[in-house]
Image (cartoon, coloured by chain):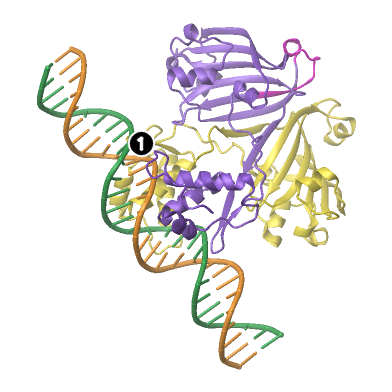
Chain colours: A yellow, B purple, C green, D orange
Amino acid sequence: MAAVVLDRQSVVPLYFQIQQRLSEQIRSGELKPGELVPSEQEISARLRVSRMTARQALKSLCSRGLAYSQRGKGTFVSRMKLEKNFRQLLSFSEEMKDRGSRPRSKVLAFKRIHPDEEVAEALHLGPAEEVIFLRRVRIADSAPLCIEAANLPARLCPELLERFEPSGSLYRELAEHYGLQVHMADEVAEASVATGAEAKLLRVRRRSPVFRFTRTAYLHTGQPIEFVESTYRGDRCKVVNRLTRHLEIVS
Amino acid sequence: MAAVVLDRQSVVPLYFQIQQRLSEQIRSGELKPGELVPSEQEISARLRVSRMTARQALKSLCSRGLAYSQRGKGTFVSRMKLEKNFRQLLSFSEEMKDRGSRPRSKVLAFKRIHPDEEVAEALHLGPAEEVIFLRRVRIADSAPLCIEAANLPARLCPELLERFEPSGSLYRELAEHYGLQVHMADEVAEASVATGAEAKLLRVRRRSPVFRFTRTAYLHTGQPIEFVESTYRGDRCKVVNRLTRHLEIVS
DNA sequence: CCCGTACAGTTGTATGGACGACTGGACATA
DNA sequence: TATGTCCAGTCGTCCATACAACTGTACGGG
């Protein structure tokens, strides 16, 4: 194990540098699943940091699922294979890029409207507040993948209609021009079959299997930023999730 | 705000007591969404604990999604409505209990077998290792809900065949008699339509929409404990998920 | 009126120390 | 051999303190 790897002048916190170093060793196989990770004391002594700092590094490693701790025994590399496939919150554009496809969109509607009650409720809108409505067919590898209808509070993204090129990445626009970072989303998925209209847009047979998603996205403050209803071709996508049992992760 | 609420003799950690107290205030509406939560200093002074302990309480509150912190400003109650509906990792029996239904099962198979390659791979089995195989139709409110086929490494639960009453809760049996706590699971969902055989078991028409799940459950060590393939009636269930965008939750 | 500075309040990072609880092995004892 | 005891190693909790980074406000000078 190396000696001097920490840059104490860096803006990157020490515990984060340590965590990254350990992550790297796990990824590279230098530390193998089931093996003991350096203990808090050992890190503390070797890298000349306080034990609390070493501890913070190990905890962040655990919270990322790369390791787990056992009181009295030590901290071990997890046997879980962490494919990056399990779902984070990705926009359509990002998801396609991840998969190496080039995303395209056919815009069906892009306008400012009065939302119905379900949308207003989901977005915590006041009375008479309007939304930007964007309905698109999403295309990957030259074939339709889904129909997506998004609603955004007009108050939070003024002039979106004028500024945004509606075939581009909405999340990117929100981040770059409005400083709005989507942080999490609640999503409901249903298994269903395509209606006639949907089948036509998705270029599948009527009554083909589809996913129906209803998603509400939030900023990290909990402010709702987007309400989306979408219909995905069942033959072209899977939903991959990682579920945890107890969420009392403590720190 | 009260004065003495902490039991310093308790086995329950101080930071956890504080976190529970704040959670309660949020749930009861005493602290409203968007409002400022007591600052680290304030908690520290009021409850006579160190700032680090107060900090740990607030962090655990944040990691549960009930609040969020902003450097230089403070910690605020999240606007997110935290319905408990979003999916944790629940066994079928637990899920039913949550919904107030009484779960029942019809056991189709319960035996020890040599797994196929996919199962052996998913469970990290050695060559010639066997699994306990359990196939059941799950019934809720007197109607079939899903067909479920579970595989467990026989090595980890010896005598399960003799001991376990296969219409009961598998997770409970694993926890109580083997000390095996399921901690997380990776799950793949597909939208599809019922085959003839499935339709008969589920009492739906052929080609009705269904979910197909493939799930691998793990202990907190990352050791795979269960591989399940299941088919759910599309008209009787939804999949509710909470997705987060950045998993670098740090500590 | 506008703008920069100063300041108080907050969270983020880091130090160093202390004790408790638990694990596993070495060791002594019956 | 079997059993209990002790002990070193480890993580969990908690303390007191310090400084850095950031925010919003108040104040004063131009």
Judge by depth and name the residue closer to the eye, A49 or A121: A121
Mark 1 residue crowding within 10 angstroms, few (<14) / some (14–19) / many (20+): few
Q: Going by the image, does B30 lie left or right of A165?
A: left
Viewer-proximal residue, B97 or A197? B97
Instruction: Reply above or below: B197 against C6.
Output: above
The residue lying at 42 percent from left, 43 percent from top is B13
Is B113 situated above or below B230? above
Question: Can you tell which quarter of the image residue D16 is in?
Answer: bottom left
Above or below, B112 relative to B56: above
Residue B125 seen in render: no
Residue at point 89% right, 34% down? A197
**Chain containing mark 1:** A
Picture coordinates of residue B63, whole percent (x, y): 54, 46
Q: Mark 1 = which residue?
A: A71
Furthest residue toward front? B3
Along the horizontal axis of the image, is A241 left or right of A149? left
Callout 1: SS? loop
What is the span of residues highlighted in magenta in the rendered image? Answer: B195-213
Judging depth in this view, the residue of B53 and B8 nearest the camera is: B8
At a point 67% along the width and 33% down the height, the residue shown is A239
Is B208 contained in the magenta span? yes
Decide if residue B230 is in sight here. yes
Q: Position of residue C6 (x, y in %)?
A: 49, 81
Query: On the picture, is B113 further left or further right than B84?
Result: left
Q: Nearer the viewer, residue B46 or B143?
A: B46
Is B30 left, or right, of A44 in this rendering? right
